[in-house]
Amino acid sequence: MLTTRYGSDQGAIGVSAENSLATIDLLAQIGFTGYAPAGNAIYPATPFAQSLRAAAALIKAQVGVEAIAIDLDGWDTHARQGATDGPIAVLADTLAAGLGAFYRDMTAGVAPSFALAVMSEFGRRVVENGVQGTDHGRGGAMFLMGPAITGGRVLTQWPTLAPAALYDGQDLAVTIDYRDILAEVVSKRLGNPNLAEVFPGFSPTFRGVTP
């Protein structure tokens, strides 16, 4: 359909159509279905873990991919989020199991280097609401892993959970901007020095998360 409709177009639409077809052909050659993980890694059957499995196959194919985004939804736990069981525990287990399989797979034998970042667009409140959940908060956690990460550390300017230290009396205060971390990865891993274009109006402070 793309070839028929846009193949003769010499403009931007035609170029985009050609690129799309080339990408489809390239992905068809990778063989996602038959991909065999390394390191005895077993990816759970969750959509999140299976997306990580596909990401591993794509990275190992070394076709030039620079960045992959994967979502794990459901963290908006406004009610009855639980602790050691309940929705938040299920989500945490889903996240950990998927990341564990990906790490084993990607660090076994000879594999391309990678940097993986886990983050949320917002945190959760420290103070529980009236229906045993947490509403939208500010500060949160960000995880990085991989051979391209200087790991084994916790980087923090911990404000404590003392009531007087909470933002608006209910949120963990933000002390490290997530853009500091991503800007360092973009600069050192992707080799992109144009941080002012990627993060307009922001001057990052590198934290030494990459060698």
Image: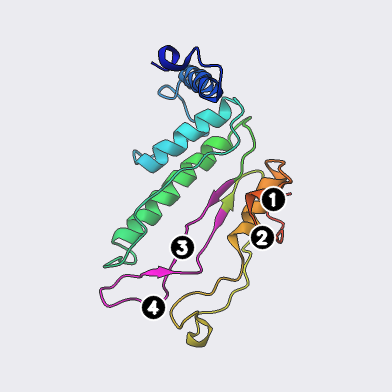
Asked whether the residues under the numbered discs 2 and 3 touch, taking CB atoms below 8 Å apart as contact, a structural biologist would say no
What SS does tag 3 mark? loop
Q: Which residue is mark 3?
A: 122
Asked whether the residues under the numbered discs 1 and 2 touch, taking CB atoms below 8 Å apart as contact, a structural biologist would say yes
What SS does tag 2 mark? loop
Structural crowding at the residue carrying mark 4, measured as other residues with C-alpha within 10 Å and reported as few (<14), some (14–19) or many (≥20) = some
Question: Residue 193 at what x, y percent from top left?
Answer: 74, 46
Q: CA distance from mark 1 to mark 3?
A: 22 Å
Eye-nearest disc, 4 or 2: 2
Q: Depth check: give the residue in front, 206 or 8.
A: 8
Nearer the N terminus, badge 4 or badge 1? 4
Q: Amino acid at mark 4?
A: Val
- Is 29 positioned to the left or the right of 48 in the image? right
Above or below, 25 against 123 in this view is: above
Nearer the N terminus, badge 1 or badge 2? 1
Q: Quadrant of the N terminus?
A: top left
Using the image, tell me which numbered label, if any, was put on residue 70. none
Using the image, tell me which numbered label, if any, was put on residue 202. 2
* Res. 152 in view: no
Nearer the N terminus, badge 4 or badge 2? 4
- Is 69 positioned to the left or the right of 152 in the image? left
Using the image, tell me which numbered label, if any, was put on residue 195. 1
Above or below, 82 against 55 in this view is: below
Extreme residue in the bottom direction: 164
Residue at 64%, 64% (x, y): give it: 155
* Res. 81 in view: yes
